[in-house]
Amino acid sequence: MAGTNANEIRVAGKGRVLIAPLDTPPPTDISTPWGAGWSDLGYTTTDGVKISKKDKLDPLDTWQNVSAARFIYSDRDLSFKFQLLQLNEETLPFFFGGGDVAETAEGSGVYRYELASEPKFDERMLGLEFADGDDVTYRMVIARGQVTETEEISLIRTAPVKLGVTFTALATADDAPLATFLMKDPSFSAA
C-alpha cells in the first residue's frame, strides 16, 4: 500500500556478487542455494553495487507542432558498477575480459594469466544478493551481459588493489526479461 511506512525502507546490509557461464540455471526462489556453476566473486568495497537503468527516448517531431507528438524508445541500458577486492582465478579474468588462469607446472604454486592482444566477447550471467536483517532477502539475476568498462588499477602501499568494473546487461531473446528479481520481503504482500 502506498504511503509512508518505515518498515518498507531497505538497507543492503550485506550482499554478494556472483557470476556464471551463460545458461547456468539460476535459483528458483530465495531459499534455493546458488547452484553449480555460480562463483561468488568475494569481497567488494563498502560502496557495494551501484545499479543504473537508463532509457533513451527520442522525440518524434512533426511539421504541425512545436513540441514532440510522441516519444520512441531507442535504447535501454541496465548496468552494475562495483569494485572487487580479491584477486583470484575468477576475478582477474572477469576484470580483463576472459581467459583462464593456469598453474605453470603441476605443484609449482606459480600461476599464469595471459591477457589477449585482441579483445573477445566474454558474456556471462550475473547474480546479486543482499539481505536486510534476517527476514528480508533480495536476489537479482541477469541472464546475459559482460563487463563493458573497467577502472584503472592502483598499486599503492596504503590501500588494497581494487578491480572496478561496470557490467552491462544484454538482451537474451524476444520477451525474455533483462533482469529477474526474487524478493523475500513482507512489503510485497498481496494484502
Image (spheres, grey):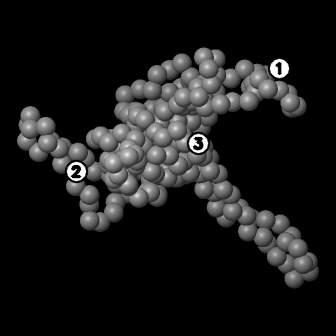
Element marked by disc 3: loop
Q: Which of the pair 157/48 is nearer the observer?
A: 157
Whichever of callouts 2 and 1 sits on the residue coming sooner in the sequence is 2
Mark 1, residues whose alpha carbon is within 10 Å: few (<14), some, or many (≥20)?
Answer: few
The reply to whether residue 29 is visible in this rendering is: yes
According to the image, label 1 marks what residue? 191
What kind of residue is marked 2? Answer: Tyr
Q: Residue at x 40, y 41 (%)?
A: 85
Q: Quadrant of the N terminus?
A: top right
* Number of the front mark, 2 or 1: 2
Task: Specify the quadrant that holds the C terminus.
Answer: top right
Q: State the image coordinates of residue 15 (x, y, percent, origin top left).
A: 52, 31
Q: Residue at x 49, y 50 (%)?
A: 167
Total marks in image: 3
64 in relation to 10, above or below: below
Residue at (40%, 34%) from the top-left corner? 42
SS state under label 1: loop
Residue at 90% from the left image edge and 78% from the top image edge: 66
Rendered view: 142 above or below 58 = above
The tag earlier along the polypeptide, 3 or 1, is: 3
Is disc 3 surrounded by few (<14), some (14 to 19) or many (20+) residues within 10 Å?
Answer: some
What's under tag 1, amino acid-wise?
Ala
Residue 136: quadrant of the picture: top right
Q: Position of residue 17 (x, y in %)?
A: 47, 36
Res. 176 in view: no
Amino acid marked by disc 3: Ala
| Residue that label 3 marks | 179
**Foreground mark, 2 or 3?**
2
108 is higher (above) or lower (below) than 99: above
Q: Which residue is mark 2?
A: 113
